[in-house]
Amino acid sequence: MKFIKILFILLFAFAPLFAADAPKEAQKNEAESIAAAILGQYNDLKSFSAKFDRVTTQNATGKKSHDNGTVMFVAPGDIRMDALMGGKMVEQVIVDSQKTSIINFEKKNVMVKKSANEAAEYLAFLKGLDEVSKKFTIGDSTGTIEKAKKTGMVIKDGSKMLKLTPKTPNQQVKYIFITAINNEIDSVIIIDLMKNMTQFTFSDIKRNPAIDKKEFKVNIPAGFEVTDF
C-alpha cells in the first residue's frame, strides 16, 4: 500500500513535465508530417526545371531588386540558373560538384569558385527530405505566416510553411523558409546572416524532365574577364 501511495505521488509530481512535453512532441510530429508530404516528393529526384521570379530585399535600407528566369537541375548536383531583366540575360550561375561559375553579362566578367555557392543551399529541397534532414533542422512555421507577411514575405492563402535552420554554421544562410500549396512548393525564402531576404517564387515546375547535360557546360563569352576566388 505504501508503495502504491509513493507511485501516485511520483506520477502527480511529474505529470506537469509530461504535459509540457506533449505539445512539443505534437509540433514535432506535425512538422515531420508536413515535411514528408512536401519534400518527400523530391527523394530520388533525377532532374528538375522551373521558372522563377526573384525579389531581394536589403534589410538595412529596405531597397528591393527584382529579376526572373529559369532554373534547371540534374542529379546529383548540377544546377543552372539564368537570370533575366527585361527579357535580357544578366547573369548565369552554373554549379557542379567541383565549382560554381557566375557569368555577369552586364559587367562582362566571370567568377569561378571551387565549391558550390549559395544556389546549392537555396535549392536544397531538390535533394529530397532525407538529405535536407541531414543538413537542416526542419520546423513547421505555418502558424507564423501572418507574422511573416508583415516582414515582406509574399505568401499565398492556404499555404503551409517549413523553416529550415542549418545544423552547422553557414556563411550564406541563417534560415530558409519553404512555402507550399497542396504540398507543391510555391516559393523559397532565404534569410542571410545580415537579415537580407531573397524570395524565389516558382512556376511551371517540372519534376524529372529530360534535360541534356550539355545545358550545364560553361560557355564564357569572348572578352570576358575570368577571376578565381
Image: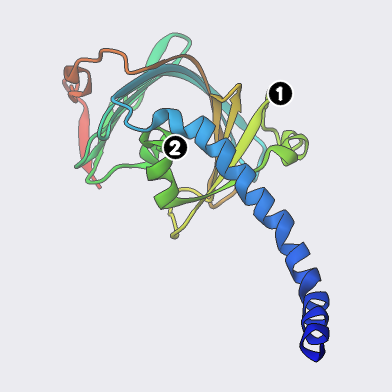
From this viewpoint, is residue 222 visible?
A: yes
Counting from the top left corner in percent of width and height, residue 31 is at 60, 44
- Closer to the eye: label 2 or 1: 1
Q: Nearer the viewer, residue 180 or 102?
A: 180
Q: Residue at x 40, y 11 (%)?
A: 88
Q: Which residue is drawn at 77% across and 63% down?
A: 19
Badge number at residue 42: none
From this viewpoint, is residue 177 visible?
A: no
Q: Quadrant of the N terminus?
A: bottom right
Badge number at residue 158: 1
Determine the residue located farthest toward the bottom in the rendered image. Answer: 2
Whether tag 2 and tag 1 are in contact, CB under 8 A, the answer is: no
Counting from the top left corner in percent of width and height, residue 68 is at 48, 18
Amino acid type assigned to the residue bearing label 2 in the image: Tyr
Counting from the top left corner in percent of width and height, residue 43 is at 37, 33
Dot 2 falls on a residue whose secondary structure is helix
Residue assigned mark 2: 122
